[in-house]
Amino acid sequence: MPPHNSAVNARVGLLRARGLKVTAQRLAVLDALMSAHGHPSSEEVHTRLKRKHPTISLSTVYSTLTAFTEVGIVDVLTLADGITRYDTNTEPHANFVCLRCKAIIDLESPNVAGFLEEVRALTPYEVVGQKLEVFGYCDKCRGRAPRGRSKA
Ligand SMILES: [Zn+2]
Ligand SMILES: [Zn+2]
């Protein structure tokens, strides 16, 4: 079984464990979300779905993604451009954001989890998550002129 399918199967188990009914529609949205590799917006997930599932509306996609967020199987990212994106990596990590092509890439670092542990140990706060963004230019974009801000 390709790794993508086993990742989807793992999420199916999570849906059940978090008390969400596993419907064909939810599975379709989940599959599109996982195959988007990264941090798609609800519009991007909808565009991926349209070919195979032309009857699923954008508002259905949005409410399904909201349900996924509420049970914690995806994280919401709201970056400076105001577009809400969905992150299938719910482990503590930083996101690298390319300022030119807007690619968002997971940065795995044990230090992020360690930082959360440190905050828990050193403060009286109940820490439930983190959002950490690192900005710059990806390997394809570094050294090139930045794009005009007007055409974001
Ligand atoms: Zn880039
Ligand atoms: Zn991420």
Image: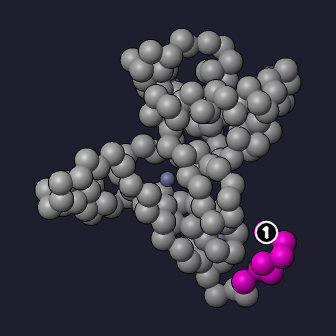
Left of 128 or right of it: where is 50? right
Residue occupying the far left of the picture: 121
Secondary-structure class at tag 1: loop
Question: Does the segment drawn in magenta span residue 63?
Answer: no
What amino acid does circle 1 point to? Ala
Residue occupying the point 48% across, 66% down:
133
Q: Residue at x 74, y 26 (%)?
A: 60
In the image, residue 100 above or below residue 45? below
Q: Quadrant of the C terminus?
A: bottom right
Q: Which residues fall within the magenta stretch?
A: 146-152
Q: Say which quarter of the image contains residue 103.
A: bottom right
Q: Is residue 51 visible?
A: yes
Colour pattern of the rendering: one colour
Is residue 37 visible to us here? no
Query: Picture coordinates of residue 84 (x, y %)?
Result: 65, 50
Q: Percent position (x, y) of residue 94?
A: 42, 61
Compared with residue 67, is residue 84 higher up or lower down, i.e. above or below? below
Q: Which residue is mark 1?
A: 152
